Amino acid sequence: MSPGKWLRTSLLLLICALFVLHSIYLPRIPLLDTLERATYDIRLRMTVPGGVDDRIIIADIDEKSLAALGHWPWDRGILAQFMDVMFDHYQVKSLGYDVLFAEPDTDPGVSALRSMAEKELRSDRQFQRIWKDLGPALNFDQRFADSFRDRQVVLGYVFAHGQSSQLNVLPPPAAELPEDFAGRLGLPQPHGFSGNLEVLQSTAWGGGFFDNPTIDIDGVFRRVPLLQEFEGKLYGSLALSMVRASGNDPSIELILDTQSNYPFVDALRLGDQIVPLAPLATVLVPYRGGANSFPYYSISDILEKKIPQEQLRGRIVLVGSSAPGLKDQRTTPLETTYPGVEVHANLIAGLLDNNIKRQPGWIIAVEFFLLLTISVVLGVINARLEPMRSLLVTMGALAAVVGGNLYAWNSGLVLPLASPVGLILFIFVFQTLWGFFVEARDKRMLAKLFGQYIPPELVEEMAESPEKISVSGESRDMTVLFSDVRGFTTISEGLEPQALTQLMNEMLTPMTHVIHHHRGTIDKYMGDAIMAFWGAPLEDPDNARHALEAGLEMVKALPGINQRFREKGWPEINIGVGLNSGLMSVGNMGSEFRMAYTVMGDAVNLGSRLEGLTKQYGVNIIVSEFTRAKVPDYCFLELDRVKVKGKDEPVVIFEPLGATSEQSEETLHRLERFHSALSEYREQRWSTAEQSLLKLAEEEPDRKIYQVYLERIAHFKEDPPDIDWDGVFTHTSK
C-alpha cells in the first residue's frame, strides 16, 4: 500500500474508532451527544399525537384565583374547602399537589389569640372556654390535613442532591430495595430533602418527589426518574404516586439485570404493567404536544362550582400555577417555556397508556456494532467508488439507517441516530475531500507527467498505486510498437500543407485511440510514424498481447479511415507495424531544456527495424520471435530468419494471423505447407521448395512472401550459398 493510502486509511480508521469508542463511553464525544439530543427532539416533535387529554385536569392557581382569594400561599382553610369541593361535589379520582407545604399556616390573628390564651388570658375561664371551642376551627393546618382523610391525595416534595439537610418528613417509601442491592443499582441517591409538614403528610394518601436530578446537560426535560433511593429505601415520583393512587395502589417490583458486574434496574413492574426504565431509573417523557395539552380550570371557578360536574368527575387532578411569579416553567423538546405541572401530566398519561418509549442498556451494544459495521462496509466501499456512486451509496446507507431508526421509534424503541448518521456523512465527506484535495492533486500531477502518453483511465489506475510509478530510468520487460505510413513522401507532395495536416490528424487520432484502448503508452509521433510501448509507466504482464492486439486493430481500422479519405478526395494510406518484446530502459530522458518519457535499448531498435521490413515481405505487421513466444494462443506465419542492420544476432520474424481458435482448417493447412516449404528451403532442397511455393503462390497470388522465396531460390540455383549457410537473410538497410 502506498504511503498516501496508508495515511488515508489510518486517518479514516482513527476517526471511525473514535465514533465506535464513543458508543461505549471511551470517551464520549460532546458534539455527538449534542446532536443526539437534537435528533431526539426532532423525532419527538415529528411524532407527537397532539390534541387534549381530558383524563388529567390542571387545577390552576391563576391570576383570577389570586385576585379572588388573595396572594399565595392561601389560608389552609380555603384549601380544605377546595378539597371538599373537589372530592364531594366533583368526585375526582385523585388529586396531587405540585406544591410544597413546608411551613405552617401562620395567620397573624390566630397567632395572637393563641398567644393570649397561653399567656395574658390563661386564667380567664370564659376566654379559655371560648378558645377551647373555637381553637380547632382556627387550626387551618389540621383542617387542611383532615380534608385528606379517606381521599386519594398525593403531596409533592423535593429531594436535595447538594446538601444533607432534612426538612419536615417524607411519605412512606414506595418499596423496599432488594437485599444486598442498596446503593448498587445506579439509582439517583439524594443527600437530603424538603418535605411537607408532618400533620399534612401523615394524613395524605402518599407523596411523590417533583425534582429532576437527571435533567440533560442542556437543561431540557427529556427524561425524569420514577424512583430515587434514600437511606436504602425507594421513593416514587409525583407522577408514579398519582398513577398508583388512581389505580387502587398497585404494587411495585423492580426488574433487575444482574448478569453483569454492575446490576441495574431494567424495568418496573407496576401491578400487571411493565414500565421500561432507562439508566438512573428514568423514563422518557411521552409528551403529547405543546402547552395546554391538558384542560386548565381556575381554582376560584372550582370553589364557586362554576365548572360542570361531568368535566371533572372521575378525573385525575394536578394542582399547579400559571400565574406570573408562581409559574413553574421548564424547557422541553417542544417548547422553551413549558408548564412544569404538564410534565407530570404527560408522564401520568404515558403510564396510564403504557406508551413509555424504551431505551434499555443493551442499546449500547447495538450502537457499537452498527458503528463498527458502517466503518468497515462504507469505509471500504466508498474508497473504491467514484464520487457520484459514492454519493448514491451514502444516500442509500442514510436512508436505511434513518428509516430503520424511525421504524424502531414508532415501535417504542429509541435507538441512537446522530452517531451512525454522523459517521456515514463523515466517511463520505472525508473520502470526497481526500479524493478532491489529495488524490486529484496526485492525478493532476500524473496527468501532467503522463497525460500526453497514456489514456485517462490509466492515470486513474496509476493514482491507485503511485508508489509504483517512477520517471527515473529503470529496466523493464516491455513491448514496443512502431507504425509508419508507406509512401508518405509521395502523399505529402500531392497535398496542400493544411490538407496534409488535417490528413495526419485524422489518421493519427483513431490510431492513438486504438493504442490507448489496449493500454498502450504513446512515446512520440514522428511525422507520419507512431512509437508506442507497453509495460510502463504501469507494469503490464500481458504487454506483448496488448501490443499485438493493438497492432492488429490498427490494421483493421485502415478501411474505415480510407473510406473517409476517399470521401474527402485524399489518397488512401497503408501502414506497416513492427513489434518487439524484451528488456528496455524506460524513464524521463533528454536534457535540461527538454525531457521526454521514452524507451531505449537494442530491443527498441529491433522493433523499429521490423517495421521497416514489412514492405519487403508484403505484410502489414511483423513481430519478433520474442513477442511471438509471449502470445502462444495466436497463430503466426514464420516469415524469415534475419539479421537487421546494427545487430549481429539473427532473429526469427513472424506475421500474426490472429487467434489460433479463429483460423479455418484451410488456413492452418496452408500455413503448415508453407512452413514445410520453408524447411525445404533452409535445407537447400531448392526444387522441392520451389514446387511447394509455386502451388501456394497459385492459391494466394497476392501474398508477396511466396515470391520473395521463389526469387531467392532462383538466385541460389545460379549462385549457391556458402557451405555453412544457416538460412539467415541479412538486411543491410533500415
Image (cartoon, rainbow, N blue to C red):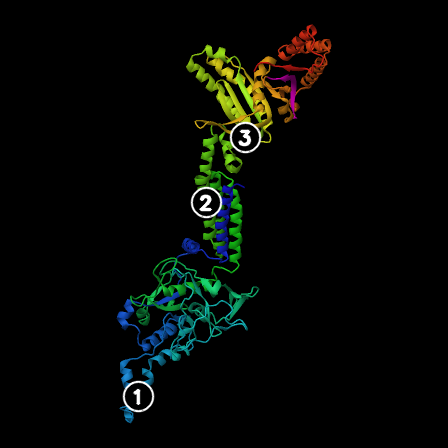
Question: What's the residue at 67%, 7% (across, down)?
Answer: 715
The quadrant of the image that shows the N terminus is top right
Q: Nearer the viewer, mark 1 or mark 2?
A: 2
Up the image or down, 121 lies above or below 348; here it is: below
Mark 1 vs mark 3: in front:
3
Residue 552 magenta: no
Residue 274 x %, y %: 51, 64
Q: Which structural element holds mark 1?
A: helix
User: Which amino acid type is marked by label 2?
Assistant: Phe
- Residue 650 position, x and y percent, is 64, 19
Compute the Cα span from label 1 to label 3.
116 Å
Q: Earlier in the sequence, mark 1 or mark 3?
A: 1
- Name the residue carrying label 2: 430
For the C terminus, give its image quadrant. Answer: top right
Q: Specify whether 652 is left or right of 452.
A: right
Prevalent SS, magenta region: strand
Quick one: SS at disc 2? helix
Depicted 504 relative to depicted 336: above or below: above
Q: Is residue 407 visible?
A: no
Q: Secondary structure at mark 3?
A: loop
Residue 151 found in image quarter: bottom left
Q: Nearer the viewer, residue 304 or 35?
A: 35
Which amino acid is tagged 1?
Answer: Trp
Q: Categorize mark 2 by other alpha carbons within 10 Å: few (<14), some (14-19), many (20+).
A: some
Residue furthest to the top in view is 718
User: Going 51% across and 21% down the picture, which residue do you hit?
Assistant: 530
